[in-house]
Image: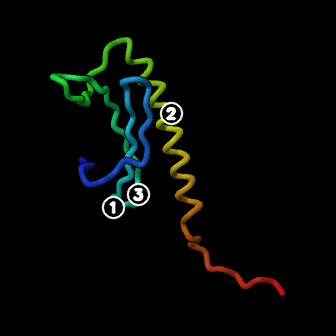
Amino acid sequence: MTDHSTNAPVEVLRDGALKATIWKNKGENGEFFSTTLTKTFEQNGSLHDGNSFTGTDLLRISELSRRAYACIGGLRDAGKRSEPSSRAQEPAPK
């Protein structure tokens, strides 16, 4: 399990009270992204995040998941563009 307490999310997508939080993590095989799906609710005057969804939330969760998937694809692509090439640079032609 990944500890998100010291790690700020790279993106938060919302649909009303529903939230997809995208985290960047480092593992043995390099960086990867994970997503936490939650629903914000108020209890005793405080806001909390839960992970229980009603039947009417499920379609919205699936669309939020689709958006998170696309966002992670963009983050991966951006990361690939910013990494230096592993190939040796050839001299410029004269």
Image quadrant assignment for residue 64: top left
Q: Residue visible at 56% across and 55% down?
A: 78
* Residue 46, x across and y down, in percent: 20, 28
Q: Is residue 63 above or below residue 93?
A: above
Looking at the picture, tell me which residue is in the foreground, 2 or 43: 43
Looking at the picture, tell me which residue is in the foreground, 35 or 27: 35
Q: Whole-Å distance between the Cαs marked 2 and 3?
A: 20 Å
Image quadrant assignment for residue 20: top left
Quarter that holds the C terminus: bottom right
- Which residue has dot 2 on it? 67
Q: Would you say 39 lies left or right of 16 here? A: left
Residue type indicated by callout 3: Glu
Most distant residue in the front direction: 45
Most distant residue in the left direction: 44
Most distant residue in the right direction: 94
Q: Residue visible at 47% across and 37% down?
A: 68
Looking at the picture, tell me which residue is in the foreground, 35 or 18: 18
